[in-house]
Image: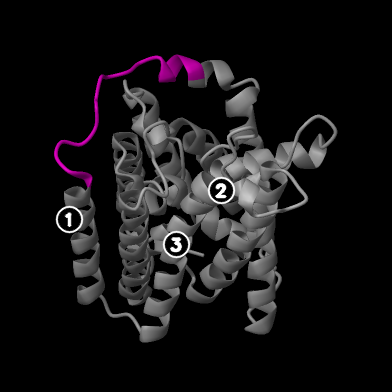
Amino acid sequence: MFETLGLEMGPRAASVWFGLLIGLAFGALAQLTRFCLRRALIGPEAERSAARGTWAMALVVAMIGTQGAVALGLVSFEAHRFHVDPVPVLALVIGGLLFGLGTVLARGCLSRLTVLSTSGNLRALVAVLVAAAFAQATLQGALAPVRMGLASVTVPLSGLPGAGWIWGAVIAALALLVVLRSRVTPALLAGGALIGALVPLGWVGTGYVLYDDFDAIPLEGMAFTGPWAEALFWGVAAQVSTAGFGTGLIGGVLAGALVAALASRSFRWETFESAGQMGRSLGGAALMGVGGVLAGGCTVGAGLAGLPTLGVAALIAFASIVVGIFGTDAVLTRRAGREMVPAE
């Protein structure tokens, strides 16, 4: 469809601007709703129900919108990494567990820390840069052999049995049940729904609107691990790398979150409170960078945007992330007798 748009730029350059627009919306909405899976699962009890309802509402809209686009033939995930066969189960499980562990230690998932980094939170800013560096090292640097070794352990899984729309309906219904059982305001529900709508918009935008037979770009959705690695590499080596959807997305999220923080007067400078907190944060960030690459995505990439693809790899990765979050929190809570690592 790209050739019909009449743009004076190639598909990849257009995808940067498209990613920027998606990121602006996500950054502003995520800042205002405090959107974060970690908060929804193990956050402060007073906030957990609302956060859970917001995240679940986003998943409902993301699932319906994405599978609707598939039904209309606007996008296909047959060649996407979440539908690869055989499935690199070991990398997915280890990566998901590491990401979940890192999320608890760093006091927020990668998307949440990205949003916080523009509201004056220097802890979050340092964490996302560390995560980006370790993600790039896992993709193309010193840790790449580890990634390739783990990815070589595969299991033949052809996909979910039965019709995709049935699975999509089941997941959406379960998420809607969570929404109905949560104590969440209409404003947060609306914010979650708008965030969820960005998921199919991203898939259709890169997979259909910007698709060109002669200059194809990758099918990409909202994510943070890969895009942060791409943005970091482009930022330090723009002469030998090309920006894409991911770079635009990160730039947009940072800008959108900053505007929302300033407009809502929630911008305030924060830094590390102790050396121990800094060590946990940086260690968690490193684990998220490595784990996010191994798992093929973060709580947004493999979760909010990945689950609606109905790929087995996304389901395994997301389940492992959730187990990692709950498991780490249980260990820390049992050791300290209280919530040792509070949410941002």
Label 1 and label 2: CA atoms lie apart by 32 Å
Q: Earlier in the sequence, mark 1 or mark 2?
A: 2
Q: Position of residue 201 (x, y in %)?
A: 48, 58
Which residue lies at the image location 55% right of the left edge and 38% below the top edge? 289
Q: Position of residue 55 (x, y in %)?
A: 37, 65
Q: Magenta part of the protein: which range?
A: 148-164
Label 1 and label 3: CA atoms lie apart by 23 Å
Q: Position of residue 188 (x, y in %)?
A: 41, 79
Residue annotated with mark 3: 36
Callout 1: helix, strand or loop? helix
Callout 1 environment at 10 Å: few (<14), some (14 to 19), or many (20+)?
few
Q: Earlier in the sequence, mark 1 or mark 3?
A: 3
Q: Is 154 in the magenta? A: yes
**Would you place residue 226 above or below residue 138 in this image?**
below
Residue annotated with mark 1: 170
Q: Position of residue 132 (x, y in %)?
A: 64, 41
Which residue lies at the image location 62% right of the left edge and 54% below the top edge? 19
Q: Residue furthest right?
A: 239
Q: Which mark is residue 1?
A: 2
Tell me the quarter of the picture where residue 59 sits. bottom left
Which residue lies at the image location 35% right of the left edge and 40% below the top edge? 314
